[in-house]
Image (cartoon, rainbow, N blue to C red):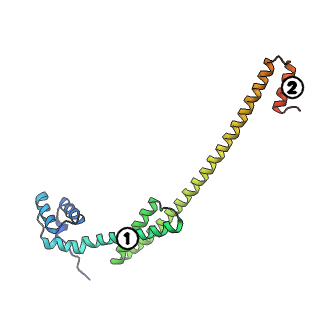
Amino acid sequence: MERKRHYAVEKLSPQARALVDAGLGDNKTYQQIVDALKKETGEKLPLSSLQRYHAKRWFPVRAALEETERLHGLVKESLEKSQGKKLDEATSEVSKAMLFKVVTALKDPDPYALYSLVLAEGRLDVQKERNRILRERTANDREKIALLERTVAVREKQIERVKANAEKVKGALAAGVKPEKVAEMVDRLLGLSK
């Protein structure tokens, strides 16, 4: 069994370690990182220790991230082509996290990590189902809105007819038509008589 290796970087203060990781992330030279570390925190780090840390600890994570981005791009592109729709942000982030776990598990097979992958796949399926339900609900809401708009349009037409009929009755009263005739006219307008 391989002995667990500890790196000098891991013995640095949290601030110094963050500085080292940020420098590696920005592709600064080892010398620039060591000089910045000495200047900002006063801590020393041999170049060879930084090189070993980068090669064995930090670089594999970065490589896994880059491979994840590449695979995620391929998956996202193929899904968008097959469905003709954009992959929503939540599903996209879940798939990217799952791809990262796959890439890292392939480099360092760990039964717990593989089990975690299985769980992540289940969570992704649940998220996809939630998204499908949300799309259905949105479609139902659109149908309800369309129905309400049609109902409002019918009610507006009814109101216009009632206004027109009221104007007819008002005109008949102003013209001096007898109240009995006006009552008959109202009954006809309301559909109470023929």
| Furthest residue toward top | 176
Q: Quadrant of the N terminus?
A: bottom left
What residue is shown with label 2? 184
Local packing at callout 1 (Cα closer than 10 Å; few below 14, some 14-19, many 20+) is few
Up/down of 69 relative to 160, above or below: below
| Furthest residue toward bottom | 1
Q: On residue 70, which mark appears?
A: 1
Residue 62 visible in the shown view: yes
- Work out whether residue 21 or residue 80 is closer to the camera in this orientation and state it: 80
* SS under mark 2: helix
- What amino acid is found at the position of numbered circle 2 in the picture? Glu
Q: Residue at x 87, y 22 (%)?
A: 181
User: How far is disc 1 from disc 2 in space, using C-alphas?
Assistant: 82 Å
- Quadrant of the rendered image containing residue 164: top right
Residue 135 rendering spot, x and y as whole percentages: 55, 57
Q: Residue at x 45, y 68 (%)?
A: 77
